Image (cartoon, rainbow, N blue to C red):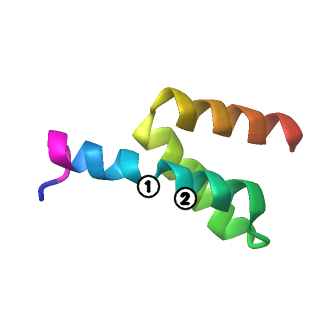
Amino acid sequence: MQIGTPEALEAAKDAVPALMQVLQNDQNWDVRWNAEWALKKIGTPDALKTVEEYQSRQ
């Protein structure tokens, strides 16, 4: 699977629920930062809403 293909985007979208949990619950700042970055890159409405909510709590 190549980066930027429709198949890659679908696979990334499948990761959104797990990344949302990591962003909300992980104790490690670096892990949360990477989850936030990935959610922004994936860019689905749910992903971006989670990032916005997380940032409003910081």
Q: Residue 6: x, y in percent?
A: 17, 39
Left or right: residue 37 compared with residue 55: left
In the rendered image, the quadrant that contains the C terminus is top right
Q: Residue 52: x, y in percent?
A: 70, 32
In the rendered image, the quadrant that contains the N terminus is bottom left
20 w.r.t. 30: above or below: above
**Residue 47 belongs to the span the image colors magenta:** no
Rendered residue at 65%/62% (across/down): 22
Which residue does the numbered mark 1 point to in the structure image?
Answer: 15
What span is in magenta? 3-7
Q: Amino acid at mark 2?
A: Ala
Left or right: residue 48 compared with residue 24: left
Are the residues flagged by discs 2 and 1 in contact, CB closer than 8 Å? Answer: yes
- Between marks 2 and 1, how big is the CA–CA gap? 6 Å
Rendered residue at 56%/60% (across/down): 34
Which of the 4 quarters of the picture holds residue 51?
A: top right
Magenta segment, principal secondary structure? loop
Q: Secondary structure at mark 2?
A: helix
Q: Residue 28: x, y in percent?
A: 74, 73
Label 2 environment density (alpha carbons within 10 Å; few <14, some 14–19, many ≥20): few
40 w.r.t. 12: above or below: above
49 w.r.t. 34: above or below: above
Q: Secondary structure at mark 1?
A: loop
Q: Amino acid at mark 1?
A: Ala
Left or right: residue 8 compared with residue 35: left
Which of the 4 quarters of the picture holds residue 50?
A: top right
Which residue does the numbered mark 2 point to in the structure image?
Answer: 18
Residue at the limit of the structure toward the top, as seen here = 45
